[in-house]
Each structure stands twice: as structure tokens, then as C-alpha cells.
Amino acid sequence: MLQYFTLYTVTETTCFIIALIFLIKDPDLTWRILILFLLITSLVEIGTVPMIKIYNKNPIPQNSDAWVYNILLIFQMGFCTLMFEHLLHKYINSRPAILTGLAVFFIVYMYEMFSLNPHGIYDYNSITETLMSVLFILYSLFFYYLLLKDESYIILKHSAAFWWVTGTLFFYFGSIACTLFYEILKSEPKSNKVYLSYISDILIVILYSCWSYSFICKKRSTQISKA
Amino acid sequence: MLELFIYMQKTVDTDIKSLIIITTLIFLIAPAFILLYVLVYNQRKKKHIEEKQRLKSEFQQELLKTQIEVQEQTLTNISREIHDNITQVLSFVKLNLAMIDPDDEHCKSKINESRELVAQTINDLRNLSKSLSFEHIVRLGLVKTLEIEAERINSSGLINTQLTVEGEIYSLGEQRELVLFRIFQEALNNTLKHSGAKHLKINLQYSKLILNLTLEDDGVGFSPGLIDDNLGSGLRNMQSRAALIGAVATIDSLPDKGCCIKVTLNPFEQLYDNGTPTNSFG
């Protein structure tokens, strides 16, 4: 039972619970949809715990959990893109940029899975993940630019959108480094890969802390606007 | 040979470790810098917006000050014209009428009647001239001016006014007293024009830290959300004037419940942001 309590499962489930508490009655559908996304992420994280054990006993690609994360990648892209569309839409018509990003993502995803991966879905789509990270970084920076360009002043300390984007920016910036090193260290001894897991741990904590705080800010702003 | 291989392996491991740590640090520091930049820029934006707001508010105050100065000058000119010209001419007419000595009794009574009417007109014009005159208000002070005004309204028979003054009277400075008196005139004008009130209570309350001027009528009242443009602009004007001297004008009214206008002033508060002395517009 204890094997299910990893840093990943605990942080993701905690963030899901926080989202459930603070966003369930939110009037904004896009924010409410994040609850579903976090539920899927938590379930994937818990579900892959026994898969890792099986893989460690018999490390063949068919036993790896890469196919689950390949599917999760689509959800990640879908939900986060929807959120970015929602946040950028406040300032500009973001649909063209968002749809272009989605199209590029799906082309690269399919190309990598069926042309580059030797074992198809059983190999992780790391190039697609890097591309997705780059897209999210660009969206985040664009959001910051629009936020600063906008004439109205907002208190960033209490801005749900700002903290959601900040968490995303930190996580995907860092995960680019992780993905690149993962490729380099594939053939290296396990001792070197442990640093990557430390970095991933830090990134996960930053991401879900920022997101949890943004959900609290969202609840607060909804209460204020209702009052 | 084996030792050399182990040594090389260890060196490669250390290099990889350093590379991972440095690159990761760069990848974490970069967004941290971006975040810092956004926070600093946003703070600057806040200051810029505040500065813009301050300038706008100063401009509004300057505009209002100029309007009031122009209005005061106009009123003073009218007051002088009434006092120096019209009342003088009327006095001359009254004198002329007195010099006529008609034999006809009917004619004599008509002349006397005319003399009384002229005298009454002269008196009314003098009072009007006083209430318009800036110098007159400054010379007599707020309380005395209000007393004269209340008396004038009572004698007109339009409405019954009752003036009460509480606390120890102190000077607020000529400009503040003048603005308070103009607010009073605006409120009175609204009461006479719109309220249909029979009674008007005027209360002036002096305390050590605060001064309250309250006007309460028993008229038809109004719903604050449903007022016409004329009345609305009059009420806004009162509030703007009050703000100019650092006072707050609150207006409470409900349909059929009369209206209560209260001006609250802290006599020791600075008038303007730009440090203009409290007793001066300029």
C-alpha cells in the first residue's frame, strides 16, 4: 500500500483535492474542467505504480508505462491548451495561435509514434513532449507580455491566472532540461539518472504548489466578485 | 589499465553530474528572472497608474477651483451692480416720489403705496446683494450669514426655516466658509424648487475635531437611483464643492421621507494634495 505514496501521487492528489474544494462551484467552466484533468493525472500516476514494478522485473518495452504517458500527453496538451486559450482570450483572439500549436503537436505526435519510435506506442514520445513544453513556454511568455501591456493593473499576488501560468512556465522550462538529459543519459549508469529524478521532484512540487495557490486565488476572486 | 578505466569513468560521471546541475539551474533561474521582471514591471505599472490618477484628480480640482473663482467673481459683480446701481436708482425714484405733493387724496395714496413698494424692493435687493457678495460673507462669517439668510427666507413666507448652532463657534477660514455657504445655497435652492417642503431644519454643529452642517426638510424626497438631471447635477455639484475643501457631503433621501444633506468637515485637514494652504483656493 505504501508504494502508492510517492511524491508524485501525493502532490498530484493533493492538488486534485484542492481543485475539487475550491473550483467545484466556480462559474468558469474552463477552470472547473481542470478538476477532471487533475483527476486523470492522479489516476494515471497511481495506476502506473505497479507497472513500474513489472517493468523493473522484466524490462521490455511492452512492460513499460510509456504508452500510458503517451496517452496522458494528449490530455495534457488538450487541457492546458484550453486553459491558455481561455487566459489569452481575455486580451486577444488567441484561437489562430492555439489551433496552429495543436496542429503541429498532433503531426509531430503521430510522426514520432509511428515513424521514429522503434516500439511505437511503447516508447515515450519525448520529442513531442519537448515540443509541447516549448509551446507552453511561448504561451506563458505571451501571456506575461499581454498582462504587462494591458492598461489595467492587477494585483499579481491574488491573480489566479498569473499563478497558474507561473507554475506551468517553471515546470515546462525545467522539464525541457529533464527531457534533453534523459535522452543523453539513456545509456549511462543509473546513478546519474537519479539527479533527473531530483529535478523532476522539484518541478512537480513547484507546479502543483503554484496551481493549488491559483485555485485558492480563483475561489477568492469569485467570492469578491459575487459580493 | 582497469584503474585507469575506473578513473575515467568517475571523471565522466562527475562531468555529467556538474553538467546536469548547471544546466538545470539555468533552466530554473531563467523563469525565475522572467517572473521577477514581470513583478517589477507590474509594480511600476501600478505607480504609473496611481500617478496618472493623481494628476487627473488634481486637474479636476483645478478645474473646479477655476469654475468657482469665476462664479464668485460674477456673483460679486452682480452684487456690486445691484448695490451701486439699481438700488441707487430706486432710492432716487423713492426720493422723487416723496417730493411730489398732490392735492388729490387718491393720487397721494397711490404714491405712498408706490414708495413702500420701492422701499421693499430696495430692501430685498440689498439682502440679495449681501447673499451674493463674497466680501459680505467673509466679513460677517458663516453663522451670521446663515442667520440672515434664514431670516430672509422666513420673511419671504416660502418655507419655515429653523437654524440651530451647537458648540463653540470657530473660524474655518474664509474660503471654507464661503464654500459651505454656497453648498447651503445650492441645497436651499433644491429644497425650494423640488421638495415642496414646509419646514427646513438647518443645524450647524461645531466640535473640536469636526464640523457638521445639516439641512433636513420634510418634502417629497426622492429615490437616489431615480433623480432627474437637474437635481442630480445640483447634488453632484454639492459633493464636488465639499470635496474641494476636504469635506464630505452625504445625501439621504427616500420618497415621501424628506431629504437630509449633511456636510462633514475636518477643520484641521489639509485641503489639497499639492500642499495649497487650507484657507486659499490659489
Image (tube, coloured by chain):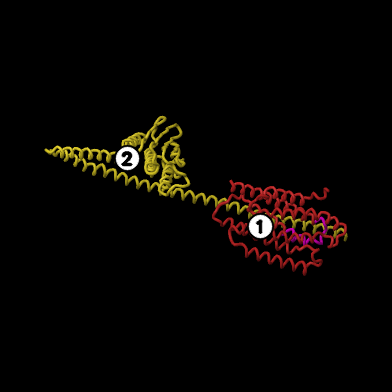
Residue B254 shown left or right of residue B109 in the figure: right
Residue B175 shown left or right of residue B87 in the figure: right
- Asked whether A189 falls inside the magenta stretch, the response is yes
Q: Which chain is yellow?
A: B
In the figure, residue B169 lies in which quadrant?
top left
Q: Is residue B280 above or below residue A122?
A: above
Dominant secondary structure (helix, strand or loop) of the stretch shown in magenta: helix
Residue A123 x %, y %: 80, 63
- Asked whether B7 falls inside the magenta stretch, the response is no
Q: Which chain is red?
A: A
Query: Residue at 60% across / 59% down in the picture?
Result: A89
Disc 1 crowd rating (10 Å Cα; few below 14, some 14-19, many 20+) is: some
Distance in Å between CA atoms under marks 1 and 2: 66 Å
Q: Is residue B133 above or below residue B33?
A: above
In the figure, residue A93 lies in which quadrant?
bottom right
Residue B282 x %, y %: 38, 45
What chain letter is assigned to the residue under label 2? Answer: B
Q: At numbered mark 2, what does the secondary structure look like: helix, strand or loop?
A: helix
Residue A180 x %, y %: 74, 61
Q: Nearer the viewer, residue B112 or B261?
A: B112
**Residue bounds of the magenta highlight:** A176-192
What chain letter is assigned to the residue under label 1? Answer: A
Residue B37 x %, y %: 61, 54
Query: Residue at 70% across / 49% down in the picture?
Result: A20
Residue at numbered disc 2: B131
Query: Residue at 75% across / 57% down in the picture?
Result: B20
- Amino acid type assigned to the residue bearing label 2 in the image: Ser
Residue at numbered disc 1: A83
